[in-house]
Amino acid sequence: MKIIAILAAFAASAAAFAPVAQPVAKTTAVNAFSGELGDQPPIGFWDPLNFCEDGDEEKFARYRYVELKHGRICMLAFLGEVTTRAGIHLPGQIDYSGVTFDSIPNGWAAIGALPKEGVIQLLLFVGFLELFIMKDITGGEFPGDFRNDSLDYGWDSLDSGEQESKRAIELANGRGAMMGIITLLVADQAGINLPLISGV
């Protein structure tokens, strides 16, 4: 019995001097991009599908550019939905046959009610904006900077804290608008009348 106790004590003391395998520091999206613009309360850095888990800076910048663009589009779409559902429409006619802007229904129904030529014009105009106007030509300060050394709107007069705050606000508003417009469109398809934006 004494021998077993001595061997156990010897094994325990020898284990104290054995090398311990150190955990390898792995770069994940959470620690690679923590503190980046958009890593803000209450969610923090949010990447539920692990698109950024490899820590690739170039890929992250591309995703941020796409997120900003989609957010800007959704802010316009949400504002357009709320405006038309409040009964505010462009004056006049949408085509030469006499169809007026205010006769076009809201939501998904508007797609079928628009004249085919009007839809083609819209697609061509958006394509023109995408290819020639809304792009970074001169190498902006950050992804989504489309000033191209011609527009400023007082941006350069702001200090770096104000600039970062405004960029974070735009990103948060874009995220909210993406959720808002998808909610409106799903409710429209489901036939749910949302009281805050139903016709006045």
Image: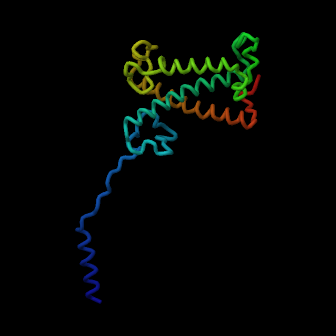
- The answer to whether residue 38 is above or below residue 140 is below
Give the image location of residue 33, x and y in percent: 40, 39
Picture quadrant where residue 12 is located: bottom left
By what rule are the colours in the image chosen?
rainbow
| Residue 114 picture location, percent across and down | 70, 21
Which quadrant, please, contains the C terminus? Answer: top right
**Image quadrant in which you'd find residue 85:** top right
Q: Position of residue 127 (x, y in %)?
A: 54, 21
In percent of the image, x 72 and y 11: which residue is there?
A: 93
Residue projecting furthest to the bottom: 1
Residue drawn at (58%, 32%) of the image: 178
**Is 40 situated above or below 90?**
below
Query: In this rendering, is residue 160 above or below 189?
Result: above
Q: Would you say 45 lies left or right of 32 here?
A: right
Which of the image's four quarters has the N terminus?
Answer: bottom left
Residue at 39 percent across and 46 percent down: it is 28
User: Which residue lies at the image location 44% right of the left edge and 13% below the top edge?
Assistant: 151
Total count of labels: 0
Quarter-wise, where is residue 120 in the image? Answer: top right
* Residue 195, percent from left and from top: 74, 31
Observer-nearest of 9 and 81: 81
Vertically, is 40 above or below 114? below
